[in-house]
Amino acid sequence: MLGQGIYTLAEVSSLTEIHPSRVRAWFRTRPDGAGRGPVFQADYAPVKGEYAYSFLDLIDVLVAGQFRDRHNVSMTVVHKAHTVLQKELSTKHPFCHADLYTDGKRIFSLAAKEVGEPILVEVVSRLQFFLHVREKLDHIDYSEVTKLACRWNIAEGVIIDPAVSMGKPTICETGLTTHVMANQYYANRENADIVADLYGVCANDVINAVKFEHFFMRRRVA
């Protein structure tokens, strides 16, 4: 788990804005054994039926959500495309690959051709789809070595880096989690200057943490 990040189902749901029941279904075999099986294989084995997810699992969900929410592509088709791209890009996490950002249309067009699903062919033929995906991927940094996602600039002044604080959202370049910063802000009567002095950061860093946690918690409750 070191350097890979670790997230609960609730955290994956909140960060990607995908309902927890959908995230759960994408990683688990149906109890009745029906269907094609899980869309994704989590990087961590379940413990007593509970799943934990890696940073790359998180990004897979983020990209798959664009298919579902923007174009209502069935998860069966997304599953097929994911499988094809695993072979093409030689990785377990093709939706995390830099080529989706730099050459997305060719990559998804290849998947559409191999899968042979009219709905996916239709989706990849629309430039608008790539604009939507790029909007999300613009905030992701990729490793020059593996070409896989390595950091998500998720909000102003806030990053998710699997190599920092177990992948929890942190204030850029500090390693301080937004959760801790926000808690300190409220514990100090919402005085950002006191918290900033306490941790040696700028007051604006504290405000960014509070804003992020407010939005994060609101999405988690929803």
Image (cartoon, rainbow, N blue to C red):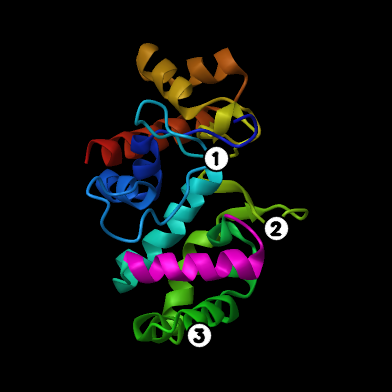
Residue 2 in the image, given as x and y percentages of width and height? 64, 29
**Residue 73 image position (x, y, % from top left):** 32, 72
x then y, percent, for residue 198: 56, 13
Alpha carbon of mark 3 to alpha carbon of mark 1: how far? 34 Å
Q: Quadrant of the N terminus?
A: top right
Which region is colored magenta?
75-92
Categorize mark 2 by other alpha carbons within 10 Å: few (<14), some (14-19), many (20+).
some
Q: Is residue 102 above or below residue 164?
A: below
Amino acid type, label 2: Lys
Q: Nearer the viewer, residue 188 or 163?
A: 163
- The image quarter containing residue 80 is bottom left
N-term-proximal mark, 2 vs 1: 2
Left or right: 12 as drawn, with respect to 205: left
Mark 3 in CB contact with mark 1 (< 8 angstroms): no
Mark 3 or mark 1, earlier in chain: 3
Which amino acid lies under the numbered mark 3 shown in the image of this protein? Lys
In percent of the image, x 36 and y 55: which residue is there?
37
